[in-house]
Image: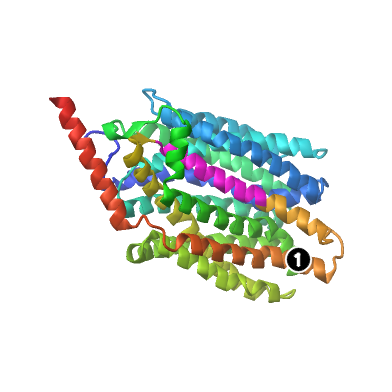
Amino acid sequence: MPDVAPSSSPPLRRWWIRLYALPAFALAMPTIPLYVYLPTFYADALDIGLAATGAALLIARIFDVLTDPLIGVASDRLHLPWGRRKPWILAGALIAGVALVRLFDPPTDVTATYLSVWAVVLFTGWTLVSVPYNAWGAELSADYHERARITGAREAMTILGVLAAGAAPAAAVAFGANEATGIAAVAWLAIGVGLPCIALLLLRLPEPSRLPEAARPGTGVGWAEWRAIARNRPFVRLLGGWFVNGLANGLPSVLFPLYLQYALQAGPLARGVLVITYFLAAILAIPLWLRLSRRLGKHRAWCWAMLLACAAFVWVPLLQPGDGAVFFAICVVTGMALGADLALPPAMQADVVDLDTLRTGRQRAGLFFALWSMSTKLALAAAVGIAFPVLEWAGFTPGSDNSREAILAIAVIYAVVPTVLKLTAVAIVWNHPLTEARQNIVRRRLDALARRQSEGSSR
């Protein structure tokens, strides 16, 4: 068997899936510090302030969003003997490594400008890795369910990386250090683990070496291409649901430390344990959601997961200080729902890319996953940009005695608003039109078109 990645539906070698998923462990390690600990750390411990921290990260995210389509198109168009995706992943990993150290192990006299600049550098390196990496995963298989296996394996490694990073601040506190030491340790650990993982990916996993004539890489993105994307209704619908759900997930992520510290009055060790519980529940639930998606379809399984999260979130405003056991159960349930958020929507994204290929004759997975990444980043930026200023407006001040109304504001933004947003996402996604049967039709037409063109060119 030739050492090339399959371009159609034969099952992948298992070690190829594992090799592809492995770098996700290192790539995910900065996630918890960046989205959960770092905003509060810069705002409170480094005394930048809530509004300034929110504004700095929002500016960095807006800049970051602008790079996504550029990198997506470039990774689609690049043709080197080494591959289309690999050179970008290598460059991005080197850039992100430097930025991690500067951002996660800062000097004591930092400013909002320092935070914004190094956040821009980190996000740029991250985009150079993540967009080609996710597009590569979509190209590994054309099978509806195997795509869910690929994304499930990748996101399982992602959560393991998140768990490893999330445990670092808690371990630092347990051994007498502070959270700042744990956050800095994450940067060095991510670099130490990431180097061999990414090296194995780039050296051992081949990219598809032959593309069907019906799926030539795009040569650019003009108005006609943007119109084709806008007319891809399954993609537009999926992207809308993903953005709304991303905002629903981003608000609790940003407010998690503040809610635990000020609403539940939980200590640093308890906060670390609850973070680990949340993500451990997610990774253990991924096989459940993959099995359920085979019965119901990927979109319906995802909707049930969002509804499950809503059923848990509605109880949060009723909790009082000391209700840690109840909140532990809520973390388990919402963590299980997160497993579906991570594993199923990216597999659905690979399906809508097939529809675009059939309609346009171009392979533009990089561009589509860049737009997917833009949606994710906008949702997270909006979460930071909305949550902190609203809390400040409500009279909440870190490190001081806050009113009952200010504490209630944390609970409402943390749980009630995300519940409404998730219900909206369910309404958008519930009747997603690209089911397994329809995706199989798309694949058969693509394969038939490729065969006809291959036969024509051989005559």
Res 363 seen here: yes
Residue drawn at x 78%, y 67% as measured from the top left? 407
Q: Quadrant of residue 259?
A: bottom right
Q: Quadrant of residue 298?
A: bottom left
Where is residue 70? Give x, y as percent: 53, 31
Q: Which residues are magenta?
A: 364-382
Residue 83 magenta: no
How many labels sit on residues?
A: 1
What colour-coding does the image apply? rainbow
Q: Amino acid at mark 1?
A: Ala
The spot of residue 288 in percent (x, y) is 40, 65
Rendering coords of residue 18 (x, y %): 38, 46
Main secondary structure of the magenta stretch: helix
Q: Which residue does the numbered mark 1 point to in the structure image?
A: 409
User: Residue 451, position in %: x, y?
Assistant: 19, 36
Towards the viewer: 120 or 184: 120
Q: Secondary structure at mark 1?
A: helix
Residue drawn at x 82%, y 45% as measured from the top left? 48
Is 274 positioned to the left or the right of 10 in the image?
Answer: right
Q: Quadrant of the N terminus?
A: top left
Quadrant holding the C terminus: top left
